[in-house]
Image (cartoon, rainbow, N blue to C red):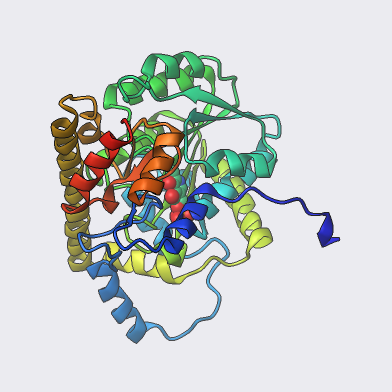
Amino acid sequence: MLENLTQQPPDKIIMLSGMFRADERPEKIDLGVGVYKDANGNTPIMRAVKKAEQLLWDAETTKSYTALIGDGGFHKVMADLVLGDTVAAERLSFAHAPGGTGAIRQILELIKVASPHATIWMSDPTWPNHPAMVKGVGIPMKTYAYLDDETRTVDFAGMMADLGQVNAGDVVILHGCCHNPTGANLNQTQWQQVADLLLERGAIPFVDIAYQGFGDGLVADAYGVRLLAQKFPELLISASCSKNFGIYRERCGLVIAVSKDAAGSALTQGMLSSLNRLNFSFPPDHGARLVTMVLNDPELRADWEAELEEVRNSMLGLRQKLADALRTETGSDRYGFIAEHRGMFSRLGLSEEQVAKLREDHAIYMIGDSRFNVAGLSDKVIPILAKAIVAVGG
Ligand code: PLP
């Protein structure tokens, strides 16, 4: 049986990490996988998370199963974090899943059973796991224009033209903030226009929010998702705690579904619960418990928010320094967009060949589409990278 399997293409990001590990050049620089790193290249456990772990170690008395959809306390703090008070609690249903990725998978399966003929729309480009998972679940997909290659800002006219083709009942994936891989984001006016257009088309928005707090701040980054929550009868949300709580390996993500009313929400809740049972039964608990403790304890929460701000500001500072270094090296402002973008990533706009040369000649690793991890930069790395970009003809 197993010999009938076909070779699967390796995940490009994970393959790149393997290549980086195997590279023996001591000066190698990793700008690939999307993990936050501090100035020393470490991915620290956030202070409040560590403190919560210590408290949990003392307080936890059992490792028995939780609930199929995870803990209600976790749902509540996350609904507050993502949605504020924009939606009545009776319209919400939840499923705690292994990571944002797990939450996306559960939402796709929910769509598949609720609306077998829907098409899912996603930005071109998007996080490569979006199309891969939609294909895996077997849902038809289409893309909408997103990036203007010249200005490296959102191609808003192209996006609106494509979204104008969406049919009633189709689902449209939107990045809540910090668009991966482009770093280019909608402003508030554009969010309003997208919301109005999708409402008019009868579409259902699906917001993937994996970097809340990494862009313009916790509340500002939730602007889009909260706006949609206020306007739409139905909304699907996958929220990841991997990045903003730094708990990548704890696999902590949440499905938040907004239904028309309490009856719709009860139905959705039943299906989400069943999907968890079928796919993995009970979700991993540790990360969710830490998030709940941090968000519920005023002292821990204040410290977490302060550290998240440090992380956010450090990435903004690194963006500005790289843009400045590239202005000096190129004598032009063509990389000025790096300072304007938000989140962990930007795409430089280099060709696959130039990216390969960066890796081969300069031991600098980034994704083939020239997406780089801002958090991989440092005062030491920035001048080296700026010179290398120019050396490969960028
Ligand atoms: N969505 C986007 C856009 C992402 O970039 C990521 C992680 O890279 C995720 C979701 C899911 O992250 P995780 O499954 O690690 O929580």
Q: Residue at x 55, y 75 (%)?
A: 65
- Number of callouts in the render? 0
Q: Position of residue 366 (x, y in %)?
A: 39, 46
Q: Looking at the picture, does residue 97 appear above or below residue 265?
A: below
Is residue 253 visible in the rendered image? The answer is no
Residue 264 pos. (x, y %): 57, 41
Q: Quadrant of residue 112?
A: top right
The quadrant of the image that shows the N terminus is bottom right
Whether residue 58 is visible, yes or no, is: yes
Q: Tell which residue pokes out farthest to the right in this image.
A: 1
In the image, 57 versus 318, the foreground residue is: 318
Residue 84, position as x, y percentages in the image: 31, 45
Q: Position of residue 121 (x, y in %)?
A: 55, 29
Q: Quadrant of the C terminus?
A: top left
**Above or below for 212 versus 66:** above
Is residue 198 toward the left or the right of residue 210 in the image? Answer: right
Residue positioned 32% across, 25% down in the render: 152
For this view, does 145 lie left or right of residue 383? right
Left or right position of 120 against 124: right
Please report the residue visible at 35 percent of the width from the left and 24 percent of the height from the top: 154
Relative to 108, is 249 above or below? below
Residue 202 placement, left or right of 317: right
Residue depicted at x 35% and y 83%: 57
Residue placed most toward the observer, 373 or 52: 373
